[in-house]
Amino acid sequence: MLRWLPALVLLGVLLLPAPAAAHDATTTARAQVTGTGVNVRVVLDLEYDLLMKSAWLYATAYDAKERAEQLRQLRLNRDAVVTYVTERFAVAYDDRPCAPSLTGDANVRPRDKKTYAVLTFAFACQGEPGGTHAISSALFPDAETFVHSTETLVRYDLGGERGSAVLVAESPTLKVGERAEPGSSGRIFLLGALLVPVALFPLLRRLRR
């Protein structure tokens, strides 16, 4: 029995599943988010072939190289692509999910020597003015085994607030427009008023000398 032990160990190692992170490929999804209140517009840039693979489409879709054929495949597989994206990218308003809909046909454009699919979504939200938006992304997770460590770069202009953030698996949600605690602005003003005399006190002492 002992003489077969090395062979059994080797067989066991070969049968172990490969880890998802074994793939060296990574990707960056990009989201341009604009709007005010309940009306939000999101333009997503996603690697074309990765998107088509992740949506579990045939090789004729993700292997397409010519622009005309890529656009045709995006039209033919519109429902599958929209389902994949909207199950993994979401916008909420005051903790209520906004309803996404793809506006127009998807486009493609080159970026970083790769082809990206460009998808524009309108998110219909519900709520009162002055609420908080939450943007969440779980696009191209490690579990799909195509890539690892996906980042979603978000640039936003929502309700007059502008900025950018990188969403990752460990921190997948960005909140924009969080209300300050009642009285916080007053406390900040009071703190500033107290700190100014303290900072000037040494200068005043030197001037008196």
Image (tube, rainbow, N blue to C red):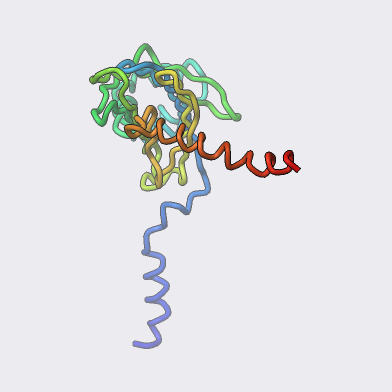
Relative to 176, is 17 above or below? below
Relative to 128, is 172 above or below? below
Q: Residue furthest top?
A: 104
How far from the left and from the top, in percent, is residue 16? 37, 63
Q: 57 and 136: which one is in front? A: 136
Q: Report which quarter residue 130 is drawn in.
A: top left
Q: 87 and 22: which one is in front? A: 87
Q: Is residue 67 visible?
A: yes
Q: Residue at x 53, y 26 (%)?
A: 115
Instruction: Pick the quarter of the image with the C terminus.
Output: top right
Q: Residue furthest front?
A: 208
Relative to 78, is 173 above or below? below
Q: Residue at x 26, y 20 (%)?
A: 125
Q: 160 and 146: which one is in front? A: 160
Q: Residue at x 57, y 26 (%)?
A: 111
Q: Residue at x 29, y 26 (%)?
A: 93
Q: Is residue 199 left or right of residue 88?
A: right
Q: Residue furthest right?
A: 209
How far from the left and from the top, in percent, is residue 155? 48, 26
Instruction: Pick the quarter of the image with the N terminus.
Output: bottom left
How far from the left and from the top, in percent, is residue 199? 61, 41
Q: Is residue 81 left or right of residue 49?
A: left
Q: Is residue 118 visible?
A: no
Number of marks drawn:
0
How far from the left and from the top, in percent, is residue 72? 41, 17
